[in-house]
Each structure stands twice: as structure tokens, then as C-alpha cells.
Amino acid sequence: MNRRLIERLHAIVGDAGLVTDAAQCERHLTDWLGKWHGAAAVIVQPATPAEVADIVRICHETRTPIVPQGGNTGMSGGATPDASGEQVLLSLSRMNRIRHIDPINNTLTADAGVILSAIQTAAQEADRLFPLRLGAEDQCTIGGNLATNAGGTAALRYGNTRDLVLGLEVVLPDGRMWDGMRGLRKDNTGYGLRELFIGSEGTLGIITGVVLKLFPAQRGRATAWLGVQSPLCAVTLLTQLRARCGERLNAFELMSRSCIDLVAEHHGDTMLPIAPHPYHLLIELSDTDADAMEVVLERAVDHALENGLADDAVIARNDAQRAAFWRIRERISDAQVHAGKAIKHDIALPVSGLAPFIERADAAIADQFPHGRLANFGHIGDGNLHYNVLVDKTMDDDTYARNIVDMNRIVHDLVAAHGGSISAEHGVGQLRREALKSYKSPIEMELMLRIKQAFDPNQLLNPGKML
């Protein structure tokens, strides 16, 4: 890269904003899963929105591509530069300020680089709740959550990140700033610009600030672990729980027995709450009432047992037991890493389509890949299933690559046949960019490309991602 350009960027961010340490550079240039490795001409870490705007303005002037990056915890390669060494990697990790909390309007205003868990803590200290819950919440940033429209375990009740946002501050591809930092729940004055940037994976603009919704603190929680025979039993039970518990149903997690077995195999200190079943459920209710939740959940679980929807169940009697339940769920991904090479699918289906999809997909995978080990889990309350297949970790790379292509085609074709999506909460990035063309309609792809062209005609923001 032009030495003069690096000097100009250095003049904006100073020594503290230029990453030169080899180990730090590697951390930014390799994705969280270790699947994608890139190179960058320079890695900059601006400290303010104004510095971001100045950097983007210079890159626009010099036609230099930019890759925005938050906590670098993505699952689809959306924040990793290519191998050309010509791209500027712009990390927002120094932009970590909680700007304002408004307890009357129930909003929190923050920089895009604030770690998600820090936002949760700030809300808690104000006696409020910010409900986004992710496995990477101690590392991911709210800007990255916005860019990918992250989901998580509480999306059943509160929605994805998109549903938790009121206002945005965005640096456009030419360096101008759009100030949409309005804490309004109603604003009927034109196109929903905010919605375009959320989930756009940094291809339309760089989010630098956000106004988030806060909710009343949840003082009562009740958590149960159940064993069921099938996904159909799980979906039927979900329907009944929604009718009985309404908005208090906070989480409804499905885990196949193979997932539970993997956790037990690779985390020796794991104590299973009940004997193994074909499928397990982790259910949680929460409310502002500190006393009523356990009674409500007990009645719902008793009803499920009496009607044959569940075969066994246990309710957490204290915070330690509740944490132990969730620890099993959170260890599934790590256990899969230890077990073998995984072919992963982050899919969404109508809840009514989950059971028939799983039945058909299981049969198809068993027929075509008899040695594969299915390990399926997900937030089925909102239709999000992580449909994963493990293959032998000694499999050579070429065979593995062919299996990925063949298995993706089987799974994604079935997802499309059931009216689903090939990406529920992890984004498109590099991983699903080519597949997107097959599963989006031509008119959808055309409209997305038109929007990209309108915002970023020089294709400078996160090139090679999504489109």
C-alpha cells in the first residue's frame, strides 16, 4: 500500500490507533473459527466516530477497500480481509463508551465497539435489562451484533438484535455521517434507513453508535430441563407453553441426544440433569415478579408429563443448578470442535416446519452419509436450528470439501422446500455468499445489488462479503 496513505491514516488515529504488533495483527486477520485467514495493508483502531469518518473519507478518495471489524467473533468470515494485502482493516474495539442511559425512555446509547456483556452490565446497574444473550457476549461487540443481526437464546421473547434498536449512527462509504440516533418508538417520516444497515454486514456503512431498547429488570426466573421423544413433541409442548405462559417464556432450547453425549464425552465434569433421551429441552421463564415463576413452570411441566409430551423433567431449585443447566447447552459447540470436523448449518424454518424438516433431513443424511454423526440443537422457539453433521476429523481436506458441498445442497434444498432460510443468525459473510444466489429469488438479488450500488458504487465497504 502507498506509504503516504498509511501516514495519513496514522495522522488520524496516532500510535495508539495503529496496530503493528505481530500477535495482535494475527488476531485481527484470522477469524474466530480459524477458517479464514487474510492480510491487510494496515490495521487501524479509531477512537471516535469522527476518526472513522476521516478514515473512510480518505479511503474513498484513494479507492481503498475497507473491512470493518468488531470483536471478530463471527461464524461466517464476514470480518476477515482477503489475501491481497490491499485492504484497510478498521477495528472499532477502541470505541467502547457507554454514552448515555435514559431510564425514563428505557434506552441506552453506546459506541459500536462496546462489548455486549458491558452493555448488559450497564443496563443491570440502571435496574434495567438488555436481553441479547450470546455465547460470545464477553467478546463480541454491539456493532458486530448489529451488522449481523445476531439472535441468541432470548430471541424467542425479545427478537433479534434488529428488534432491540431505536437509533443508529453510521459512517457512509464516502465518509459522510448519518445521524439517526433518535430514541423514538414511532417515526413515520420516510424509508426505514436504520433497517438497511442492520444485518448488512458492513457492506453499506460502518455503524459507529446505537440507541438500544431497555426493558424492566427480570426479578423472577424459573428453569427446567426435560427429556422428550421427538421434535414433534417439543414443538407441541412449545405451543402449549406459549398458551399457558405467554410473554414470560424466555427461552426454549432443543438439543438432540448426540449433543448431550458429546458434552459428556468432552467435558468430564458434566452432570446430566436426567437420563439421556432422544431429545432434551432447556426451558426458562422470567418476569418482573420474583415469586410466581417457579410455580407457573412446575404446573406447565406437570401438564407436559401427564399428557405424554415429556418423559422426565427437573426444575432448577437455585442459581447454581440453573447455571449448570445452561453450561451444558453452552458447551455443545466446543464439544463439537473436539469431536471431529463439523459441517454446520445455521437455518431458520417456520416453527410448524421444524419437525417435518428434521425427519426428512435426518433420513437424507443417513442415506447419503451413513458415517456422519448428527448433532442438532437450536433456539426452536423462533425456528432457528443449528443442524450440524460431524465427520471423522482424520478425513482428508479434499473429501471434506466435497462432503460440505454435497451435504449443504441436501440440507439447504430441504430448508428451501419448507419455506426456510439458509442463514438464521450468523450472517452470510464469505461462507454462504455463493449459496445465497441459489436460494434468494432473482428479484431479491437484484434489489440487494441495487441498494449496494446506490450506497457504495465503488465497492469499497467489505468487498467479497454477502454479495
Image (spheres, rainbow, N blue to C red):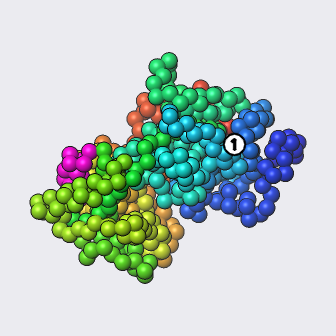
Q: Position of residue 397 (x, y in %)?
A: 52, 69
**Residue 16 appears left or right of 294:** right
**Front-most of 259 and 217?**
217
Q: Residue at x 35, y 57 (%)?
A: 221
Q: Is 73 in the magenta? A: no
Dominant SS of magenta comes to: helix
Label 1, secondary structure: give it: strand
Q: Residue at x 43, y 44 (%)?
A: 216
**Front-most of 308 and 172?**
308
Q: Position of residue 316 (x, y in %)?
A: 32, 67
Residue 255 appearing in the image? yes
Q: Is residue 196 above or below residue 84?
A: above
**Residue 125 appears left or right of 460:** left
Mark 1 lies on residue: 66
Q: Residue at x 73, y 59 (%)?
A: 25
Q: Position of residue 96 (x, y in %)?
A: 66, 48
Q: Is residue 250 above or below residue 335?
A: above
Q: Is residue 8 above or below residue 309?
A: above
Q: Amino acid at mark 1?
A: Ile
Residues packed near mark 1 inside 10 Å, few (<14), some (14 to 19) or many (20 plus)? many
Give the magenta range.
231-246
Residue 372 appearing in the image? no
**Residue 102 appears left or right of 250:** right
Task: Pick out the residue farthest to the bottom.
Answer: 268
Q: Residue at x 71, y 49 (%)?
A: 94
Q: Position of residue 196 (x, y in %)?
A: 52, 32
**Front-most of 387 and 248?**
248
Give the image quarter of residue 99: top right
Q: Is 233 in the magenta? A: yes
